[in-house]
Amino acid sequence: MAKARKSPNAQKANRGPANPAAPAAAPRPATPRTAPRRRRASSNSGSDLEWLRYAALAIISVIIWCTVYDRWSPEHWSVPVEYGWKGESSDVVGNLAGFKSAMDGHFWPMIFHNNPQLGAPYSANWNDYPATEDFLFWATGVLAKVIGLFAAANFAVMTLQTLAVLAFYYAARRLKCDWGWSAAGGLLFGMAPFAFAHSLHHFVVTAYGHVALGALVCFWVSNGRGLRIGTRDYWIAIGIAAATGCLNVYYASIFIQMVGIGLIIQWLRHGWRAAIPPFTIGCTAFAAFLVMDLHTVLYGLIHGHNPTALLRNYPQMELYAMKLEDFFMPFPTHRIPMLADIGKKFYSLTSLKAEEPPACYFGFAGIAAFLWLAVVTVRNAIARDRKRVPFEAVLVLWTLLYATVGGINGMLGVAGIELFRSTTRYCIVILCLSLLFAARRLSLISRNWSSPWPMLAPLLIGILGLWEFLPPNPGEDIATTTMVVDSDRTFAQTMEAALPKGGMVFQLPVMDFPENPIAGVSAYDHFRPYLYTKDLRYSFGSDKGRVDSAWQRVIVGMSPADQIAALERYGFSGIYINKNGYPDKAEALLEQYKEAGRDQVIPSQLDDVCCVILKPSPNPVLPPPGPLFSTGWFAEQDTPSGRIHLATGNGVVILTNPGTEPVDVYANFLIATVAPRLVTVQGAGASQSWRLTDQQHAQPASLRLTLAPGENRLTFTTDTPPTPPQMITFFLVNFDLGDSPRAEQ
């Protein structure tokens, strides 16, 4: 049986003195034991100093943010950092509408989201599009009641970036980094170009501070024997996991994956029991996600699944995937002219620009940290010193394999699992891990430096790093934004004063919500007047894919005179027109409305929108359901040739009969293709096929249908895959229903 090895000190004691001739040392007298000293009240000075550091770091973050965005006066705070007049930030109006809904009491966390001021004459449904960030929108809306909508939006963005700074600092300190390097890393993380690029228009993406806390949890569950259930750090990890599940799903997904890496490590090292803590932490994040999205699941069960509310496809997954080179490419507005020129040239050449404005640039400090991590990893891997391979490298490698172009996420997309299209957003995860690695290594190295370098070096690197990659002109020009906001506010308030209390406004061009821009009009531009009115109701803003919004497409197919008659019959008081959605700025349409007797028009100061006053019926009726182009279609396109529906493969059209008896109708349309194919339609008593050749030879069709009460499905199938590059199979032109076949197609 092998003998137990003794410690080096015990071995020395047993060996005796080195020189046998030397006399043995006299035994030392025992030191009398004294009572332990009572801890003085000042023993908490260390924790007090740490809290002061947190406070100082928060103040510094606020000063940096206010300086970068030039928000030093109440007038500037009342102007949003983004309003969407720059195309790349156009999504911001959708977020502002979410804050407004919460401010008005129509948006509460974890329950059905229905807004009676949108989706007129019905109530807008916001339950089909999965989202987990309810608490962010609700809290900002509550704050908006106190300080105003735009000031609350600005404050929310500033708070998110400040919390990111503090979260990184906490994570680094828990990993035993010096406070100086922790603070420098926190500022570089929270004030990264990623935050200013996403800002208010990608509000939920800017809420990324918990990424640093998630990295800390991954260290805990992977190192040594991991976490033990019931310990303080375990419950902190559970809290971080729950918070992660309540925020953006991209970050929740990568957190669960990384915790899964820790689970595998513990299982392989110490058996399945050691894997239980990371398993429970990952399950907590997933459970929190499910709870936050439960209203979407329940709404689908009650009202039926809506497959068109959230549309993703593989080409998008390639376009918005992560690319390694993006970490090194400066943004085109960089303060150093040479770097700005490099950025302009790169983004003018690449066909995969990812999200705009560019958000992935690491800056000199981040690039240095990333390359340092890569060099140490490769060096240690070659030396086969596996224990010294930084754990950050494992997480970075997995993130790259998963998120890069053609990576694991792309393979899942090819297999039909098209969930995460913008994996370029994971660049902030890699930046976080790189900065944590640098903070840990520099903390060890700098402990041997002489004063004042252990404090001066983090300060210099933090200042130089921030100066280099802070954008010189983030957001939007304050003067221009103020002009647009003033125009919208004056127009909306004038419109509300001219229309009856609670009046309904039909919005043109008709657009699907969400994520469906058209030429000249961004996806959420129709929300602009809603931000400033109290009682008016607008037709835009209900999740696409439901019958209660399909009737609006029928209105577009009518003549202007018939549009007026129908809308007044439905109780609408005005027609809001965004002129940018029409090649002639809607001049012909306004002239036709004038000829139909509706010549009272309210213009905006900038003449980009207007409202035609209608005379609503005192006894309005609800519009009949219109044809709903369900699965397999792109959004409707209004062109000079007519209303076009492009099919992405096989397509389904839902026709609803609101009565109690079957009715006979005719479906009239033109059908064409971009490549030769056979198209067949079946449903509602009809069955017909067309042998199509090209888009120049459209064939007229008049299908006699018998619509049973409720929903009826017309299914279009084709024998040939979609034609690249547009990935279209066939298309329908001017689809409508009538009592007889259309005389002329």
Image: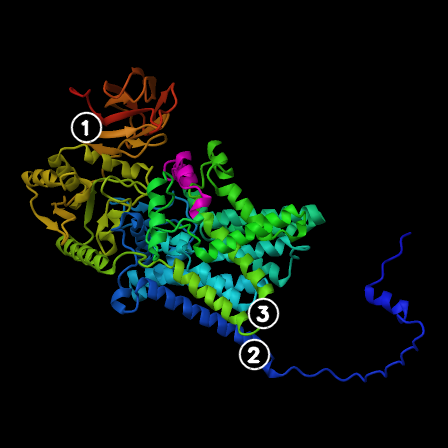
As helix, strand or loop, the secondary structure at mark 3 comes to: loop
Q: Looking at the image, is mark 2 or mark 3 nearer the viewer?
A: 3
* Category of crowding for the residue at label 1, using alpha-carbon neighbours closer than 10 angstroms: few (below 14), some (14–19), many (at least 20): few
Give the mark, 2 or 1, whose residue is nearer the N terminus: 2
> Residue 184: where, in percent of width, then height?
48, 64
Q: Nearer the viewer, mark 1 or mark 3?
A: 3
Q: Which mark is residue 45?
A: 2
Q: Provide the secondary structure element on which disc 2 rests.
A: helix
The residue carrying mark 3 is 449
Give yes or no for contact between labels 2 and 1 (Cβ–Cβ under 8 Å). no
Start-end of magenta stretch: 300-326
Amino acid type of disc 3?
Trp
Residue type indicated by callout 1 = Ser
Dot 2: within a 10 Å radius of its alpha carbon, few (fewer than 14), some, or many (20 or more) residues?
Answer: few
Q: Which mark is residue 660?
A: none
Rendered residue at 46%/49% (across/down):
427
